[in-house]
Amino acid sequence: MTPEDLAALAGPAGQELLAELRDHDPADELATATRLRRRYDAPLVSAALGQARLRQRAAAKFAPEDAARMYFTPAGVEQATRATVAAYRARRFRELGVRRVADLCSGIGGDVMALARAGIEVLAVDRDPLTCAVAAANVAALGLSELVEVRCADVTEVDPAGREGCDAVFVDPARRTGRGRTFDPEAYSPPLSWAVGAARAVPFAAVKAAPGIPHEAVPEEAEAEWVSDRGDVKEAALWFGTGPGTVRATLLPGGASLTGAGPPPEALVRPVGRYLYEPDGAVVRAHLVAAVAEELGGGLVDPTIAYVTADAARPTPYAAGYEITDVLPFNLKRLKALLRERGVGRLTVKKRGSAVEPEEVRRRVRPQGPNEAVVFLTRVAGAPSMLVGAPLRDGGSAG
């Protein structure tokens, strides 16, 4: 999409086209394009069809009613913060008493809109003219223009704490280079070190990072928060002005938040009990598995494996629970015989600490029958093992 395309889509004919394409089937796109070109200019039809496709993709990140009114670029859809995560971050800023945020590297405005909806003034800065135009169009489409200023500029030339009057900063550096995604924080654009410097200049700040950021890369004065949404780890965020040295795992949409490290993992290793718990990915990334084990009155099957074992079934938002029926040394022939004996045809295979792929296990054991089971390929006290069980349902019983 070009700025000219965006302007055309915002006009009366473009709005008519986008409304007509709101629920169109991409499989019928060729026929749809042919039909529409009888009434509209071909370039406008092409731009509208491209935008309709992007809006359908964006519905996975944004509320459908918002996605249907917003404008997107392919990179903007991919890089935008999921709406649930952006809304959570905006609530944290609001609870801190923040009035005005400089959103640096603001992209198409996902976080901008969440901040404005929380009643916070936003200075949105990005250096790409098209991205800024799209962000401005999105702010206007959702009726948030009074709270947002979109500025096309180099973020390194903005002074949030000085003449801009901001009491908080949010930085979302680009984590892709010409060779793809980068895992080196200093290869972010701008680098993490610059983002941390910007964060230190204001009372409160959040710097978005990849979930795999090394713990040793977190500044001592920052709080490190890993956020998952419906079990999918979305990001790490470094907070400044909150709790120096705090490590947190937050699970959305419920908002459960876990802090504290728990005892050393080596001190919690114990034999496998009746129940096994699989911690949420944010808990694992935050190195808080031991804290979950302590909460459940349990331990770990191995000091290097993120599985918690316990003798009692307890509800927890931080892990999925399973009732274990069998603990076996790793042996696929033995597993095949066990599953056949129990008539297991629906088999879920999970693994941590095993080099064997779940697809290979299913191919080798050939599950057949009306029943279902879960198999965990892991290590128990260093030994390759197989744990067989079933998920805990509401009330703590296995299904």
Image (cartoon, grey):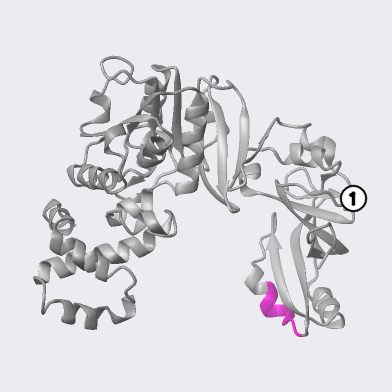
Q: Is residue 288 above or below residue 329?
A: above
- Along the line of sight, which residue is nearer the eye, 218 or 137? 137
Magenta residues (range)? 361-368
Q: Kindly give the residue lying farthest to the top in the view shown.
A: 162
* Spot occupied by residue 221 in the image (x, y as percentages of width and height): 53, 19
Local SS, label 1:
loop
Mark 1 — residue? 312
In what quadrant of the picture does the N terminus appear? bottom left
Residue 379 visible, this angle:
yes
* Spot occupied by residue 228 in the image (x, y as percentages of width and height): 57, 47
In what quadrant of the picture does the C terminus appear? bottom right
Q: Is residue 311 above or below residue 343?
A: above
Q: Is residue 348 left or right of residue 220?
A: right
In which quadrant of the rendered view does residue 289 lie?
top right
Q: Is residue 368 left or right of residue 132?
A: right
Determine the residue positioned at 52% across, 42% down: 212
* Spot occupied by residue 190 in the image (x, y as percentages of width and height): 33, 33
Q: Is residue 133 left or right of residue 172?
A: left
In which quadrant of the rendered view does residue 351 lie?
bottom right
Indicate yes or no whether the magenta region holds residue 367: yes
Residue 381 visible, this angle:
no
Number of numbered labels in the structure image: 1
* Spot occupied by residue 363 in the image (x, y as percentages of width and height): 67, 79
Indicate yes or no whether the magenta region holds residue 379: no
Sort mark 1 into few (<14), some (14-19) or many (20+) by Cα contacts within 10 Å. some
- Along the line of sight, which residue is nearer the eye, 224 or 365? 224
Q: Is residue 399 above or below residue 102?
A: below
Which residue type carries mark 1? Ala
- Along the line of sight, which residue is nearer the eye, 254 or 371? 254
Determine the residue positioned at 59% across, 53% down: 230
Determine the residue positioned at 21% across, 42% down: 128
Look at the magenta stretch and give its main secondary structure.
helix
